Image (cartoon, coloured by chain):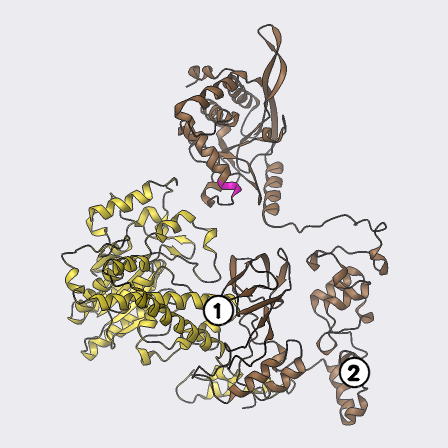
């Protein structure tokens, strides 16, 4: 712990940058001014060294070499999905894509802790969590290609489609968790959001209700340091995890680039919720290595040095180092991981390019589950409007 | 499957890289015509209004043609690269279960229709309505060639067509398809788009005299340019909107008669635009006064020689600018009004405690004034190093935004260009700027005789709202005193 603390300190203090008040690095990284509780839980440090932890080791005792390899493969694959989708956007095939580069460990570690009957309410960046839930890759892209209002049936994978309204999904999760209470079930609602979302009223309201009802919900905050162009230090002068106890919700800070630690703290939180212990707030301290979305240019607002600092804490590199030190990173394995990633990327691209265009009248589908006269009238008007165009080949005549 | 399929040409059109952008500038090509590229290989850097992004190749194949040169602003949807794609297995949807199998056989023939042959494309589109046309143009609906309905024409043209309808073919004279639409509606103003109408107006061309060659007789940019007398190929490679109106008529090629011959017109944008706005704002809000002082800096030059030889300065570049910067910090402490700012909105004078020393740097992007924070706290050796890295970083274009804001006073080193003096314009919001002239060997009065001495001229501009002549003069005199005799610092700090 102390060794790691010294390392993090030196990385930031040794630089030539002038420390500006209220910047992201100043407020979030553990510094001497913080007490021990602010120190993120870490099992695997940025150099790939596994550190023993008296409490959390037991929660990942079952993670053997094979499981570590699977976690690594997951992270490689989702990074590849991310890169391929970004390329598809640059090629005009997607309208927009919100990259998760750098946040693989936070999403895979937490996503792999979930049970099938748990339910996920995420923001728009949790594509790795969707991957863990077994989303169809083409479904992942439907919304971003502008071909559908939502990508999949939430009940098919027990994950709601991405919420774009910042923080709104936390209310949905709390509501769902209150429903679990009513059912007397032991499933858990898991909600993902970012550091910026913690400033939203919705998130605060969700926490109030979750605490009041002791609902089985886990608030998983990926503090990726940037709310688009606003550094986290502007919104949080103390670590975000410190807010939750004010609502009566226990919280934990975890190294969001450490897949093992993320797995461990999420398992603990899920176990608490299942056993009637109520909500937990997890702050995974990670970093968005790429742009906010493909329409953003982070070079305009953040320091290249900061990016470099975080590149040295890459979540994949440290796990690769650990696997290597365990003799588990042989060429056969890395080849097979690469082949899997290639196949997934090819499937993603294929699915994107061959997605059928929606028909004009499709907009009326899925609005109501039952017939609705008001909608029928609109549909009739729209049909007649379309008919006012010249008769083009087959369009609209279904 | 791929071995027998012939190679064919694929066009890559500029996508909408942000959300709702209409154009982007090609900053740099990473490939040349004839290069072989892999899928997702970076082929270009493109700057949109929002970001500079890398374009990955949508195909594996050979680059046949780069349609636009680096530096051009391209409309979204315009072709930028043509690829020769061998085989074409990538989009043949046999491997993806989600594609209706029925569309598979027709896909190949559909895509054989080369770009531009809209008729051929439309005819096959009928058979595969559900298949998405790979439009590669943003994410919006495919353009009309995919068989999208078109709005009925204006009333007059409709009635004309209805009148002609019973006659069917006989009423339509055989002719080139381009002229057809125009012939059908002779009374109507020929169709064109607003930018084309503007171009025609700018060039003094009446659209009635232009024959449209676009779809349905639409008058396109090239038609207007052709009507001027030259085709677009003969015009200088500028972005069309900045073409100055040239005299109408076919004589534009004549080299001597055209007053604009030999001129290059560059759109005012980016750094140049910002610099201009800042300079205008500064020059016309702060009343500038400039004072000059010519100083015998021989003792400073001797000091520099000693510093260079000293161990503490090993590997550090020390120049007259280093000493001037240090002198400025010392003099500013004695005359703090030069390190202040006029806050017009609040009707307050802001006095700064720290000297955030701006250094004007000429960079490939233009003028930048990065600043050294709290320069007055830095020992000389640190100041020297900061000056070195500051300008290097600026020239490499890597100055972090924080270093470009918050400056309180500036230096411009015109001496490096061999210039003696000038009347510098204040960096907006600052109260003073010092121009440092070249060090020259000049005959100069020295101990009652004329000797060859190292002489430098200092030019100080200050905001006369904040700084009176007395304070500005004392400040400049203090700097001069230090340069004339560095030991005088002992009397000042």
Q: Provide the chain ID for the residue under circle 1.
A: A
Pointer 1: what residue?
A88
**Residue B126: quarter of image:** bottom right
Left of B178 or right of it: where is A374? left
State which chain disc 2 sits on.
Answer: B
Query: Is the residue B105 above or below the residue B195 in the image?
Result: below
Q: Position of residue B92 (x, y in %)?
A: 51, 81
Q: What is chain B's hue in the picture?
A: brown
Which chain appears yellow?
A
User: Can residue A34 be spotted in the picture?
Assistant: no
Prevailing secondary structure class for the magenta stretch in the rendered image = helix
Residue under pointer 2 = B184
Q: Is residue B304 magenta?
A: no
Q: Quadrant of the C terminus of chain B?
A: top left
Residue at image coords 65%, 49%: B268
- For residue B351, what is the image quadrant? top left
The part of the image, by quadrant, that contains residue A276 is: bottom left
Task: Name above or below for residue A157 compared with residue A12.
Answer: below
Residue B117, x across and y down, in percent: 67, 79
Residue at the spot 48% in from the left edge and 73% down from the top edge: A145
Mark closer to the observer (1, 2): 1
Q: Which segment is the magenta one?
A: B393-397
């Amino acid at each position: 712990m102390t060794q790691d603390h010294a390392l993090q300190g030196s990385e930031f203090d040794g630089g030539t940058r002038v420390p500006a008040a209220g910047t992201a690095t100043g407020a979030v990284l553990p510094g001497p001014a913080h007490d021990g509780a602010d120190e993120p839980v870490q099992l695997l440090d940025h150099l790939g060294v596994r550190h023993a932890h008296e409490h959390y080791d037991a929660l990942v005792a079952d993670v053997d070499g094979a499981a570590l390899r699977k976690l690594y493969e997951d992270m490689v694959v989702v990074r590849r999905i991310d890169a391929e989708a970004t390329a598809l956007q640059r090629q005009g095939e997607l309208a927009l894509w919100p990259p998760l580069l750098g946040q693989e460990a936070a999403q895979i570690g937490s996503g792999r802790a979930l049970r099938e009957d748990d339910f996920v309410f995420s923001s728009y960046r949790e594509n790795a969590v969707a991957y863990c839930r077994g989303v169809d890759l083409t479904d992942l892209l439907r919304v971003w290609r502008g071909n559908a209002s939502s990508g999949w049936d939430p009940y098919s994978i027990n994950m709601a489609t991405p919420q774009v309204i910042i923080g709104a999904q936390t209310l949905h999760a709390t509501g769902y968790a209150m429903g679990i209470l009513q059912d007397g079930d032991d499933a858990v609602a898991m909600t993902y959001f970012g550091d910026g979302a913690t400033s939203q009223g919705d998130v605060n309201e969700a926490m109030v209700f979750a605490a009041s009802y002791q609902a089985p919900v886990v608030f998983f905050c990926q503090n990726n340091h940037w709310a688009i162009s606003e550094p986290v230090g502007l919104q949080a002068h103390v670590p975000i995890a410190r807010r939750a106890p004010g609502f009566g919700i226990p919280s934990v800070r975890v190294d969001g680039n450490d897949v093992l630690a993320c797995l461990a703290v999420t398992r603990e939180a899920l176990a608490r919720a299942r056993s009637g212990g109520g909500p937990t707030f997890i702050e995974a301290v990670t970093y968005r290595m790429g742009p906010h979305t493909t329409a953003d240019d982070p070079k305009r607002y953040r320091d290249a040095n900061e990016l470099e600092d975080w590149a040295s804490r890459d979540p994949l590199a440290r796990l690769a180092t650990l696997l290597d030190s365990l003799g588990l990173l042989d060429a056969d394995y890395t080849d097979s991981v690469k082949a899997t990633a290639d196949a997934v990327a090819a499937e993603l691209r294929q699915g994107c390019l061959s997605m059928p265009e929606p028909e004009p009248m499709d907009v009326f589908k899925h609005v109501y589950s039952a017939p609705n006269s008001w909608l029928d009238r609109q549909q009739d008007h729209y049909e007649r409007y379309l008919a006012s165009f010249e008769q083009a080949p087959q369009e609209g005549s279904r | 499957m791929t071995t027998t399929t012939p190679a064919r040409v694929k066009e890559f059109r500029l996508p909408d890289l942000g959300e709702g952008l209409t154009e982007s500038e090609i900053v740099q090509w990473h490939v040349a015509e004839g290069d072989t590229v892999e899928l997702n290989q970076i082929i270009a850097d493109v700057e949109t209004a929002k970001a500079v992004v890398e374009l990955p190749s949508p195909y594996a194949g050979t680059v046949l043609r780069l349609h636009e040169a680096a530096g051009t602003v391209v409309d979204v949807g315009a072709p930028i690269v043509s690829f020769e794609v061998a085989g074409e297995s990538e989009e043949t949807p046999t491997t993806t279960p989600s594609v209706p199998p029925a569309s598979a056989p027709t896909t190949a023939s559909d895509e054989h229709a080369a770009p531009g042959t809209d008729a051929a494309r439309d005819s096959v589109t009928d058979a595969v309505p559900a298949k998405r046309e790979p439009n590669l143009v943003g994410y919006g609906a495919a353009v009309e060639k995919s068989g999208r309905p078109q709005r009925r024409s204006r009333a007059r043209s409709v009635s004309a067509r209805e009148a002609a309808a019973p006659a069917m073919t006989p009423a339509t004279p055989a002719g080139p398809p381009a002229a057809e639409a125009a012939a059908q509606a002779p009374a109507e103003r020929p169709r064109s788009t607003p930018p084309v109408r503007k171009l025609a107006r700018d060039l003094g061309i009446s659209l009635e005299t232009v024959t449209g060659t676009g779809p349905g007789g639409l008058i396109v940019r090239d038609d207007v340019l052709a009507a001027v007398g030259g085709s677009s190929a003969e015009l200088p490679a500028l972005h069309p909107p900045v073409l100055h109106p040239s005299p109408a008529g076919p004589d534009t090629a004549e080299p001597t008669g055209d007053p604009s011959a030999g001129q290059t017109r560059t759109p005012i944008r980016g750094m140049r635009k910002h610099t201009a706005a800042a300079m205008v704002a500064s020059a016309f809000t702060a009343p500038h006064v400039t004072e000059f002082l010519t100083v015998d800096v021989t003792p400073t030059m001797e000091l520099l020689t000693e510093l260079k030889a000293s161990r503490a300065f090993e590997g550090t570049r020390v120049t007259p600018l280093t000493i001037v910067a240090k002198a400025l910090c010392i003099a500013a402490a004695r005359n703090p009004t030069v390190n202040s700012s006029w806050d017009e909105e609040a009707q307050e004078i802001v006095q700064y405690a720290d000297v955030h020393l701006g250094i004007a740097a000429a960079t490939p992007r233009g003028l930048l004034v990065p600043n050294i924070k709290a320069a007055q706290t830095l020992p000389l050796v640190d100041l020297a190093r900061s000056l070195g890295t500051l300008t290097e970083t600026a020239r490499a274009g890597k100055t972090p935004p924080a270093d470009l804001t918050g400056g309180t006073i500036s230096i411009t080193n015109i001496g490096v260009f061999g210039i003696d003096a000038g009347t510098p314009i204040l960096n907006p919001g600052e109260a003073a700027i010092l121009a440092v002239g070249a060090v020259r060997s000049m005959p100069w009065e020295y101990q009652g005789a004329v000797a060859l001495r190292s002489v430098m001229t200092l030019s100080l501009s200050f905001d006369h709202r904040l700084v009176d002549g007395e304070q500005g003069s004392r400040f400049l005199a203090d700097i001069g005193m230090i340069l004339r005799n560095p030991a005088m610092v002992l009397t000042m700090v």
